[in-house]
């Protein structure tokens, strides 16, 4: 992140459109085009549509590695290195993240150590090694850049090495429209749209040797857009305030990590958090950002990595059952009901999951028990859902996402989390089986886009000879279910809960703190 001495706040760098061969934008104000050192290249005109293309480029040299552990301190990282070296792996230690300036005299350090297994000749070799490890779903293959990309970009016959910035020559709220921005990448709502941008647009050659455009803007203006891009500006002010605080934590906790080696802090899509440009900002969006300015959630001397998802389905999941095997107390299981029970019976066995999905619990995201405002009508289908496959149909989907193992004859649960979400499943085929996990891999492999969640059970229908003819998945929730349930929190806001009560409900172990 950068720092703006005029406002006394950080500027965020958001990857609004990534890895494109060409990018079009329209200017609504005159602007100066400068190279990355600040040298003026040309003056742009108001009301013109421009196209940025690639001159010459070479992608970054990237090495596949397996992330085995995350450590906050050097001593802890050293212990992890020794542990994994005993397994016989070639281990490297990489420090990632940012030490971000938040005022003239203060910084926030989110840096951490990644313990990486290296020495693989291809991503496939790294992936095969990952799958041989116990609890392989806790580890990820990362493509780590070892030599940066090089190249040039062309605009109006000007060819500029590495990249350039467009700086509006006047103070105008929305000086640029960025065309054909991809939204919902890989999900069922994947589409392209035009988005209005404020402040600076920066174009760079990215790791793939293609073009990425970065919107550089004030962090609080960015958050005002996030709180209405993630849900809707029609939500109650108290919910928007809670969403804004959570999104602010995400910026400070993850900048420089989720997109290590990219020239931006966070992307603009669901992978990080949704930012649909500054045109998404409404008056309530701005108010929510102003009333929570500088507020974050804090735990154990660090800003919380506050995950959130659309619909928890009734019970929230714990961090370690979805991602790497770290216990983060502020991302723990929860019951999403108004009684705020601290203790409940986990839905982590097969005899409990069927009655739970068939039930109608008194939880905030249940449209049958709590009135949904009109702007949440579209979410009602996700509280409980059903998907039906033939073995052949599912086999073709799995072949695209995982491996061509033939028709899927059954899906057997191996391990469930507290919320009933599957951590690992076994795919049964004619001549064998395959194990997949954790949560996101299950959702990705078993759907053309993504299953709504991994909280489901399977009914298998067979013919008279015992041959599988249909698999029906009965499910609950939309998303990973960790942290704030957006629909549940939005309903809480409608029912009169304050933003602080909402945050305490979903992040019980965290402390609210103002850092600027």
Image (cartoon, grey):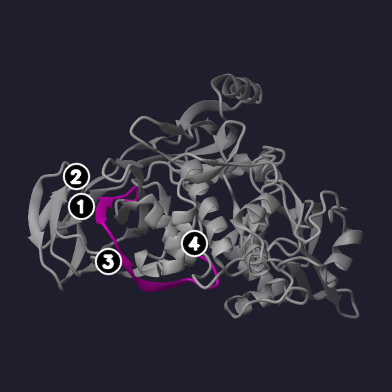
SS class, disc 2: loop
Q: Is residue 416 left or right of residue 493?
A: right
SS class, disc 1: strand
Q: Residue at x 45, y 36 (%)?
A: 97
Look at the numbered discs 1 and 2 and tell me whether their residues touch, using CB distance below 8 Å: yes
State which quadrant residue 282 falls in.
Answer: bottom left
Q: Nearer the viewer, mark 1 or mark 3?
A: 3
Toward the viewer: 481 or 62? 481
**Which comes sooner in the sequence, label 1 or label 2?**
2
Up the image or down, 120 lies above or below 335; here it is: above
Residue 456 picture location, percent across and down: 77, 65
**Which comes sooner in the sequence, label 2 or label 4?**
2
Residue occupied by mark 3: 174
Look at the numbered discs 3 and 2 and tell me whether their residues touch, using CB distance below 8 Å: no
Magenta stretch: residue 220 in it?
no
Residue occupied by mark 1: 165
Magenta-tinted stretch: 186-208
Q: Residue at x 10, y 67 (%)?
A: 45
Look at the numbered discs 1 and 4 and tell me whether their residues touch, using CB distance below 8 Å: no
Residue occupied by mark 4: 227
CA–CA distance in space, label 2 to label 4: 31 Å
CA–CA distance in space, label 1 to label 4: 27 Å
């Amino acid at each position: 992140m950068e720092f703006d001495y005029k406002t006394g706040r950080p500027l965020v760098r958001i990857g609004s459109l990534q890895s494109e061969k060409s990018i079009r934008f329209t200017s609504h104000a005159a602007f100066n085009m400068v190279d990355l050192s600040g040298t003026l290249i040309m003056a742009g005109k108001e009301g013109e549509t421009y196209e940025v293309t690639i001159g010459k480029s070479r992608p970054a040299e990237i090495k596949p590695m397996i992330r085995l552990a995350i450590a906050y301190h050097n001593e802890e990282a050293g212990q992890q290195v020794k542990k994994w070296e005993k397994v016989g792996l070639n281990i490297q230690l990489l420090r990632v993240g940012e030490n971000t300036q938040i005022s003239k005299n203060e910084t926030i350090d989110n840096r951490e150590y990644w313990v990486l297994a290296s020495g693989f000749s291809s991503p496939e070799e790294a992936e095969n090694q990952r799958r041989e490890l116990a609890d392989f779903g806790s580890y990820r293959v990362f493509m780590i850049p070892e030599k940066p990309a090089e190249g040039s970009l062309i605009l109006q016959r000007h060819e500029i090495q590495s990249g350039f910035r467009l700086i509006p020559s006047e103070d105008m709220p929305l000086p640029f429209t960025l065309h054909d921005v991809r939204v919902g990448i890989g999900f069922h709502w994947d589409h392209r749209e035009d988005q209005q941008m404020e402040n600076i647009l920066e174009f760079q050659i990215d790791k793939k040797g293609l073009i990425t455009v970065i919107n550089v803007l004030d962090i609080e203006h960015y958050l005002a857009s996030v709180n209405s891009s993630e849900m809707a500006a029609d939500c109650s002010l108290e919910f928007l305030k809670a969403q804004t605080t959570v999104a602010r934590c995400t910026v400070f906790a993850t900048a420089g990590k989720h997109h290590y080696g990219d020239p931006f802090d966070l992307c603009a899509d669901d992978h990080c958090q949704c930012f649909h440009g500054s045109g998404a900002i409404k008056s309530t969006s701005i108010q929510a950002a102003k009333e929570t300015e500088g507020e974050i959630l804090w735990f154990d001397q660090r800003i919380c990595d506050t995950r959130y998802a659309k619909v928890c389905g009734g019970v929230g999941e714990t961090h370690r059952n979805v991602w790497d095997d770290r216990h983060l107390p502020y991302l723990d299981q929860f019951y999403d009901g108004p009684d705020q029970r601290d203790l409940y019976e986990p839905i982590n066995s097969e005899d409990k999951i069927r009655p739970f999905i068939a039930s109608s619990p008194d939880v905030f995201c249940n449209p049958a028990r709590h009135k949904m405002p009109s702007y949440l009508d579209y979410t009602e289908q996700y509280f409980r859902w059903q998907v039906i496959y033939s073995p052949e149909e599912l086999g073709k989907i799995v072949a695209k996402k995982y491996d061509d193992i033939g028709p899927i004859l059954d899906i057997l649960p191996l391990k469930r989390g507290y919320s009933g979400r599957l951590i690992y499943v076994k795919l049964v085929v004619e001549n064998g089986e395959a194990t997949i996990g954790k949560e996101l891999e299950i959702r990705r492999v078993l759907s053309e886009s993504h299953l709504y969640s991994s909280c489901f059970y399977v009914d298998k229908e067979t013919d008279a000879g015992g041959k599988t003819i249909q698999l029906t998945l009965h499910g609950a929730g939309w998303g990973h279910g960790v942290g704030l349930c957006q629909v549940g929190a939005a309903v809480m806001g409608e029912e009169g809960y304050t933003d602080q009560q909402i945050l305490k409900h979903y992040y019980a172990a965290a402390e609210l703190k103002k850092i600027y």
